Image: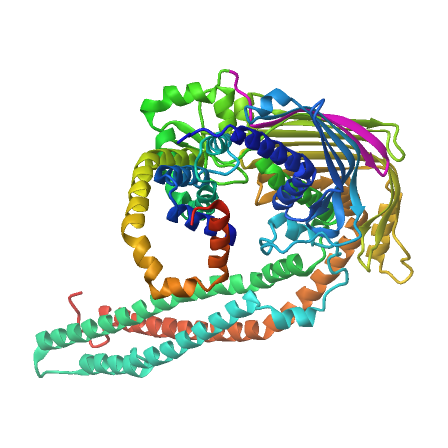
Amino acid sequence: MKWIRWQGLIAFVVVVIVVMGVWFFVVDSAIEAVIEKTGTHVVGAKVELEGADLSISPLGLSLTGLQVTNPDEPMSNAVQVDRMALLVEGAKLFRRKVIVKEMTLEGARLNTPRKRSGAISRQPAAAPSVSKRAAGEKFTLPPLGVPNVSEILQREKLRSLELAEALQADLQTEKDQWRKRLAELPDKVKLATYRERIEKLRSAKGGTGVLGAVKEVMGVQKELRKDLDRIKAGQNALQKNLTLFRKRMDEVADAPLADVRRLKEKYAFSPKGLTNVSRLVFGGKIAKWADTALDWYERLRPVLERSKKRKEGHEVVKPVRGKGADVRFKEHEPLPDFLIRIAHVSMEILAGSIRGQIQNITPDQDVLGAPLTYDFSGEDLTRLRSVKLDGALNHVDPSSPKDTANFNIRGYRVTDMSLSDSTELPMVLKKATADLKARAFLSGETLKANLLAGLQSVEIATGSQDEAGGLVKAMASAVSDIKEFGVEANISGTLKAYDLQLSSDLDRVLKEAVRKQVDAQVTRLEKELQSAISEKVSEPMADIKASLGGLSAISSELTARLNLGNELLKGTKQSGRSGLKLPF
Amino acid sequence: MLRAIARLLSALNSQTEPGQISLAFCFAMMAGLTPLFSPHNFLVLLIVLLLRVNLSTFILGLGLFSGIAYLLDPLFHWIGLAVLTAGALEGLWTALYNTTLFRLEKFNNSIVMGSLLFSVVLFVPLYFISNQMIVRYREHVLAWVQKSRIMQAFKATKLYRLYSTYSEFRGTA
C-alpha cells in the first residue's frame, strides 16, 4: 500500500489559501471587535469603532470613528477620535511583538455628546471617597443674627448654676450636722453647773477638810478642760470648713463669667467661620477635577503595568485576554509584547487645537527600560493664551512607580463662574483672567499635588442685598471690591483617600470685612448672656450667703462657750474669797 | 456530520489498514488538544493530507478532542508551567524563545506547551492501542454487531442508508 498521496499537497495549499482568504476577509471586523471588547472592559463603558482597515504594505492599521464613553456620564464620550493611523513593524509580528512605530490621532475631542447611552452593566460603584464628599459641600454662611439668649440657656447647662447648687447643698448638710453637734457639745447651762460646783466648794467648811476640797476642785478643773478641748476642736473644724466654703463661694461668684465666655464662643458668629470660605467655594470643584483625573488613572493603569508574578525565578505574565500564562525568558533584544513608540495627537478642545505627543506606550516598561512621557501644548487659543501639559508615567521599576504631571495655563478668561449658590450671599465670578499652575506627583499609592491659581481683573457679582443684614452687606461689598485674588490647593494622601487643603485671599478679605459687625454682635450677646446668667445665679448665691451666715453664727456660739469656759477655768486658779489657796 | 460518521463506520468495517485509521486518530488528538490555529497544526494538517490516513477519522477525532481539550485546560496549564519553569530546561527554552519560528509557535504559553507535550507523549501509545482495538473489533465484534437486534434496527435508519450508499459507491461494503 502506498502511504503518500501527493494530491494531498495540493489540498493543503488550497486549504491554506482558503484559510488566509477567510482571515483577510474577516480580519478588519475581528480587529474592530477585539478593540471594542478590550476597550469596553478596560474603561467600564462602551468603546465603539466605526471601522478598521488593515493594510499589508506598509503594514498598518487605520481606525475610524473611535468613541470612548465616559463611564460616569454614559450620554457623553470622554474621548472621540475621528481617525487613528498606526504604522506597525511587520517583522516583529513574527516574534509575537506588536510594535507600533508611529501612531497618529487626528480630530481627538473630549466630552462630546452621544446619541445612545454607552453604559454597560457593571458592579456598583465603590463608596464615595473623602474628596467626593467634599465635592458635595455647598457654600453656606454661618448663622448671622444674634442668637436668642433664653433659648441658649434652655439648651445649655450652666456651670455656675451647678456649682452654686452643689455648694448650697453642701452648706445645708454642714449646717444640719453642726446643729446636731452643737447640742452634743457643752453649752452655757453645763458650763454654769461648773460655776455652781466651784462656788459650792469655796463655801464648804469643815467636812473633808482642805485637802479634800483641793482634790475636788482639781477634779472639776479636769472635767472643765476636757469640755473646753471638745469645744475648741469643734471650732477648729468648723473654721476649716468655713474657709473651704468661702473659697467655693468665690468660685461660684466667678463661674458666671466663665459661662458667658464659653457660650459666647459657641454661639457668637466669629470671623473664624470664614477661614474655610475658599474650601467651600473652590474645594468641590478642585476635588471633582482631582477625582476625575485619578479615576481615569486607575482605569488606564493596566495599560501601564500588567500583572506579573515570578515562578521558579521566571517571570510569568498573565495575558490580558486568553488562556494560560506566558512565561518569559531572557531576550537577546528585549522588547515589550506591545509598544507604541510615539503617538502624535491632535486634540480639539473648546478653545481650539492642542497638539502633542506620547512616547513609549506599553504595559511592559520594565522590559523597555523607559517610561511613558507626554507633552501637549497649545497657544493663542480662543479663551486662553497658552496651555501646556507634560509629565511622565514611570513604571520601569514596577515596585516603585513614579508618575508626574505638570499643567500650566496662562491667560484663561473666566466668565460667569458660579462661586456660591447660597441664598444669603450668591456669588458669581463675572469675569477674570486666570493663570494656573499645577503639579502632581504620585509615588506608589502616595499622592502629592499642588495647585496655584492667580486671578486678575476680577469682577464678582453678589446679587441684590436690599433686605440683607449689615453683615451680609459688608461681605458683599468686600467681595465686590476684590480685583485680584489667589487660590492655593494642596492635596496629600493616597489615591483612595486624600486630603485637600485650600487657602485663598478671599478668606482674609471676608474676615476683615465682617470684623466690626461681628465685634458689635459679640458684645451685645455677651451683655445679654451676662445679665441672664447673673439673674439665674443670684438666688442660689443669696441662699449660699445665708447658709454661710448660719455657719458663722454657730462659730460665734462656739467662741462664746469657749470664752465662758476659759473664764471659769481662770477663776478656779485664783485664790477665792474663802481664803482657800489652791496649789496650781 | 452524519456523512462523516458513515464514512468512519465504513472505514472501520472495510479492509482499510488499521494504521491509517489509528494514525488519523492520533493526529486528530494532537490538533484537537492543542490550540487549533497554532502553527504546528498546519504541519499536522499537511501530514494528514500528504499521508494516506483516513480523513473522516481525523475530522471526527478533531471535533472529539477539541471538546475534551476544554476540560483538560487546567491540566495542560499545570504541565506547561511546570515544564517551562524547570530550571534544567531554562537554556533550551531561552534559545527557543529567541528564535522567530518558536515565538510564532507561542511555545512559552503554558497551555500550548502543556497540551503539545501531553499529545506528543500519548501519540505512540494511542496509535498502538487504536490499532489493537480496530483489529479486535473486526475480529470479534463486527459479526456479532451485524446480527444484533440493535444493528437490525439501525439498518432501518437514515444514517445506515447513507453508510450503505457510501460503501456501495466506494465498493467496500
Residue A109: which quarter of the image?
top right
Magenta segment includes A239: no
Magenta span: chief secondary structure:
strand
Residue B24 or residue A509, whichever sits in front: B24
Residue A102 or residue A149, whichever sits in front: A102
Residue A10 or residue A54, whichever sits in front: A10
- Residue at image location 46% in from the left, 22% down from the top: B97
- Residue at image location 55% in from the left, 74% down from the top: A540
Residue A56 or residue A431, whichever sits in front: A56
What are the residue bounds of the magenta stretch?
A333-357
Position in image of residue B1 (x %, y %): 51, 52
Q: Would you say residue A486 is visible in this rendering? A: yes
Position of A379 with respect to A124 (left or right) is: right
Position of A10 with respect to A138 (left or right) is: left
**Does residue A98 lie above or below A200 as drawn?**
above
- Residue at image location 57% in from the left, 40% down from the top: A493
Position of B74 with respect to A86 (left or right) is: left
Q: Quadrant of the C terminus of chain A?
A: bottom left
Position in image of residue B64 (x %, y %): 44, 48
Magenta segment includes A349: yes
